[in-house]
Image (cartoon, helix red, strand yellow):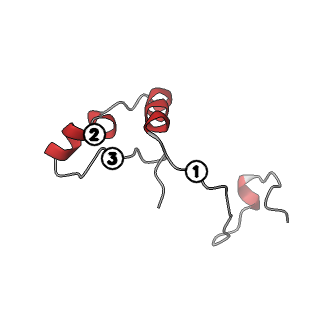
């Protein structure tokens, strides 16, 4: 099966891996994701707010994060 083939949920096997294009997440990506999901918590958008709460910088939202 090709990596670029469209799959349905039931077609994906547990443990299967996929290689996707690299993408560096930008501040604009985080803002746009927050707009779409309506998750505009300052922990995700305000580095100073995040630092005051023991994070080194603003934290990515769940689905926009990467390992």
Q: Kindly report which numbered mark, 2 or 1, lies closer to the viewer in this rendering.
A: 1
Q: Quadrant of the image for the N terminus? A: bottom right
Disc 3 crowd, CA 10 A, few/some/many (<14, 14-19, 20+): some
Q: Are marks 2 and 3 in contact (CB under 8 Å)?
A: yes
As measured in the structure, the alpha-carbon distance from the residue carrying label 1 to the one carrying label 3 is 17 Å
Position of residue 21 relative to residue 34, above or below, is below
Task: Say whether residue 21 is left or right of residue 38.
Answer: right
* Residue situated furthest bottom in the rendering: 15
The relative height of residue 52 versus residue 45 in the rendered view (above or below) is below
In terms of sequence position, does the residue under pointer 2 or pointer 3 come before the other? 2
Q: In this rendering, is residue 2 above or below 29?
A: below
- Count residues near mark 2 (Cα–Cα under 10 Å), then give few for <14, some for 14-19, many for 20+: some
Quickly name the residue at label 2: 43
- Are the residues tagged 1 and 3 within 8 Å (C-beta)? no
Which residue, given by chain and number where applicable, does mark 1 sit on? 23
Quote the CA–CA distance across marks 2 and 1: 22 Å
The residue at the point 43 percent across, 48 percent down is: 62
Give the mark, 2 or 1, whose residue is nearer the N terminus: 1
Specify the quadrant of the image occupied by residue 31: top left
**Could you tell which of marks 1 and 3 lies nearer the N-terminus?**
1
Where does residue 42 sit, x and y in percent of width and height?
27, 33
Residue 47 at what x, y percent from top left?
26, 40
As drawn, the label of residue 59 is 3
Q: Residue at x 83, y 55 (%)?
A: 5
**How far apart are the alpha carbons under marks 2 and 3?**
6 Å
């Amino acid at each position: 099966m090709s990596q670029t083939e469209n799959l349905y949920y039931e077609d994906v096997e547990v443990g299967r891996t996929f290689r996707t294009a690299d993408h560096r997440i930008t501040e604009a990506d985080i803002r746009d994701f927050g707009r779409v999901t309506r998750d505009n918590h300052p922990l995700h958008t305000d580095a100073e707010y995040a630092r005051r709460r023991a994070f080194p910088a603003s934290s990515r939202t769940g689905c926009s994060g990467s390992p």
